[in-house]
Structures are given as structure tokens and as C-alpha cells.
Amino acid sequence: MIMDRIKVLDKTFVKFIDREEIQQVVARMAREIDRDLGDENPLFLSVLNGSFMFTADLFKELKRPCRVSFVKMASYLGTGSTGQVHQLIGLQENLKGQSVIILEDIVDSGLTMVKLLEHVSTLHPASVRVASLLFKPDAFKADFKIDYLGMSIPNDFVVGYGLDYDGFGRNYGELYRLEEAENPTEG
């Protein structure tokens, strides 16, 4: 059952992007990746926890042999970024000479991705591309290219489809944004 409003802990969220639209965007991204990679067999590096649904759905759409590995990084506490990025689970794969595509659920400030890109570059991959389902251009403070972008969204706090509020709300197949009255003004 799809709901127009959900309650996650102490916050109310309203439906923002439905499941069908998300699936269409993911399928388009998979087609773009397949088109661009020729005969490359990349390693997809999925950033946990938020990108697990995106990664699973993208993998179902890809038409090539590929591998996946996971890294867990965090910079959020509650509904805001802490401004500090901590790598919680390190990468175990040998990336030397490998083609890598980093899969992220959302890029907002970009600080997490900057740290991850710095770490990955020390492992000497042949190439690194970034694929993000969501992008908040008004919150972006970094300088890197998103090679495969699903969609740009306003600077609202969102949950669902893998994204969370203090660990809850990831299980919804749709995206929900924090209700207007509760959405803090970004300065």
C-alpha cells in the first residue's frame, strides 16, 4: 500500500517521488552505463547503507558482466550533515587497473563522495565514475563530476528507497520529503 504521508520517528514526511518514476530513472541510468562502457567489466562500488535499493535495482537492469563491492561511510546525524565524514567499513577489493563505478543514493554536500574518491584514487584504478540516483545542487559544496545522474531534487530532507532518518524509513519503495512545516530552512 502506497501512502501519501508517513511518520518516521518524530517527523512527518509526504510522498515526493513514486516507485514507478524511480524505476524508470534507474532503468535509464543502466542503459546509459551499458552504452558507455563498451566491453569494460567494471567493479561497482556501492555506498552503504543508503544505496542498497538503488544498487539492487540497477544491477537487475544492467546487461553486462559486472561485480559489486560495498563501502560504508557516514556524515549524517538526524536530518543534517555533521560536516565530518567517517569511513566505517573499508574497501577490500584490489582496484589497481580496474574500472570503478561508485553508486550513491544521494549527493548533497558532496563531502562523503570527496572522501571516497580520495580513498579510491590511492588504490590506482584505471578509471572512476560516479553514479547517483539523487543530487541536491543547492547543497553541493564539492568539485567532482556525477557521470550518471538520476535526478536533481530540491534541498529537502528525504527518506525511503534506502534513505533514512536516524536509521528508519529506508524500507519504503517511494521517496518522501520532510513535511514543509518541519523542514528546516537551509542557510
Image (spheres, helix red, strand yellow):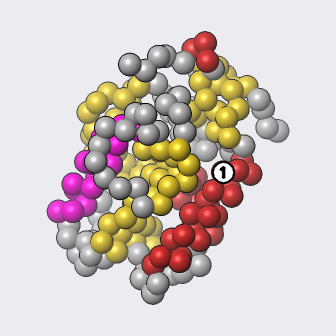
SS at badge 1: helix
Left or right? Give the position of 130 relative to 27: left
The reply to whether residue 180 is in sight is yes
Observer-nearest of 8 and 136: 136
Q: Is residue 119 magenta?
A: yes
Please identify the residue farthest to the left as the structure is shown.
122
The reply to whether residue 88 is in sight is no
State the image coordinates of residue 22 (x, y, percent, origin top left): 66, 51
Observer-nearest of 59 and 127: 127
Image quadrant assignment for residue 91: bottom left
State the image coordinates of residue 136 (x, y, percent, origin top left): 46, 39
Give the overall secondary structure of the magenta segment.
helix
State the image coordinates of residue 8 (x, y, percent, origin top left): 62, 24
Q: Residue at coordinates 31% horizontally, 37% vertically from top-left?
A: 141
Q: Residue at coordinates 49% horizontally, 31% vertically from top-left?
A: 155
Q: Residue at coordinates 30% horizontally, 76% vertically from top-left?
A: 98
Left or right? Give the position of 161 relative to 130: right
Q: Is residue 154 magenta?
A: no
Q: Which residues are magenta?
A: 108-122
Left or right? Give the position of 21 relative to 167: right
Quarter in which the C terminus is drawn:
top left
Q: Is residue 61 above or below residue 55?
A: below
Please identify the residue farthest to the top as the structure is shown.
181
Judging by the rendered image, the residue that carries numbered circle 1 is 22
Three-letter code, disc 1: Ile
State the image coordinates of residue 185 (x, y, percent, origin top left): 47, 16
Image quadrant assignment for residue 61: bottom right
